[in-house]
Image (tube, helix red, strand yellow):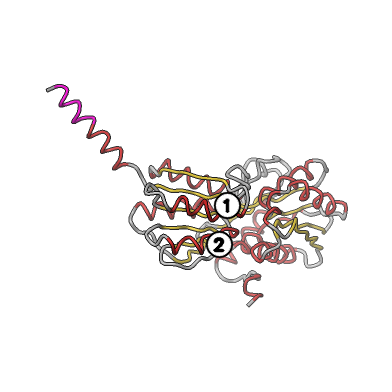
Amino acid sequence: MKLLRRFVLLSFVVSSAALAAGPKVAIVFDKGGKDDKSFNSSAYSGAMEAKEKLGAVIKYVEAPDANQFEPMLKDFAKKDDVDLIVAIGVSQSDALSKIAPQFPKKKFLIVDAEVKGPNVATALFQEHEGSYLVGAMAALKSKTGVVGFIGGMDIPLIRRFQMGYEAGVHAINPKAKVLVNYVGVTGDAWHNPAKAKELALAQISEKADVIFHAAGASGTGLFDAVEEKNGVFAIGVDSNQNWVKSGKVLTSMLKRVDNAIFETVADLAKGKFTPGVRRFGLKDGGIDYAMDSHNQSLVTPEMKKKVDELKAGIIAGKIKVPDYYEKKK
């Protein structure tokens, strides 16, 4: 009788654990991986939040190159124990466009690219809005009137960062000079910190004293460059990178990929997965700039007040930030 009670109790515990388990999520990261301190790291943070708060079961792989996106997505799609497959980054759009229609019962999320389909959700961000704010911050901090921008791969998405940044700089100082360089034109541009450092040092030699990167893992090269030079500061991107070189990072343009991941998993847990595009911007906290103990001494109250005024103006619709995507139309 005792043995029977133990068996029933054990069965109840196992069944309860199974019922308590949240959505089963599989993530495909690009070569930068979950530890890139930027875009992928933000996505991973959102997944870990879903694990902690929703009981989500998280699996992930890191693609060594773009050729592996399609087979990795397909491998996850074939598994019965995966509810949601997440493709991180615009580089996976072609692969997902092929895989999603083959598995209509599976749910997919892609970040930074629009893939249409009844089983695909897309998370897009108003990067130009946040870039405008950090551009204003750069101009307020600069003593030379020269600032820099380093993009990773030269694609429309990163041109959008650049255009917003330039507009923010010139909103503060119309005469400011913005130096612009890109690491490359292939996916490897996201993973070349040595090249990014070389570009940063070249910009510094031309008097740039604040440099913003939108270059993924390559951005670590910028941080190394500013660490070597006095009176020069970096601006981080995607996740809060202020800590990477504390006291040398003016601020970070926050792109809350973590929020997009968490909210999609939360919706799935409620049975409310919604395909189509969802946009995140300043208004809903999906985009912002970072302030913390690492950069507090670098940003004066006057600087913060001015940037917050611009932020409020964008949210209220009083300031129209130029958008590279609209320029292309």
Mark 2 = which residue? 93
**Residue type marked 2:** Ser
Q: In which quarter of the image is residue 148?
A: bottom right
Q: Is residue 277 left or right of residue 89?
A: left
Question: Magenta: predominant secondary structure element?
Answer: helix
Q: In the rendered structure, which amino acid carries the disc numbered 1?
A: Gln
Check residue 201 for magenta coloring.
no
Q: Distance between the residues labelled 2 and 1?
A: 13 Å
Can you name the residue that lies furthest to the left here? 1
- The label shown at residue 68 is 1
The total number of labels drawn is 2
Q: Say whether residue 106 is left or right of residue 141.
A: left
Looking at the rendering, in which quadrant would you find the C terminus? Answer: bottom right
Is residue 311 depicted above or below 77 in this figure? below
Mark earlier in primary sequence (2, 1): 1
Q: What element carries label 1?
A: helix
Q: Where is residue 53 in the image (x, y as percent from the top left)?
A: 40, 43
Q: Which mark is residue 7?
A: none
- Most foreground residue, 55 or 204: 55
Do tag 2 and tag 1 residues touch (Cβ < 8 Å)? Answer: no
How far across and down, in percent of the image, does residue 281 sit?
A: 54, 62
Image quadrant in which you'd find residue 15: top left
Label 2, secondary structure: give it: helix
Task: Identify the residue at horizontal 65%, vertical 52% (top origin).
Answer: 237
Quadrant in the picture for the N terminus: top left
Local packing at callout 1 (Cα closer than 10 Å; few below 14, some 14-19, many 20+) is some
Residue in the picture at 50% in, 63% down: 98
Residue 41 percent location from the top left of the image: 58, 46
Magenta region, residue range: 2-10
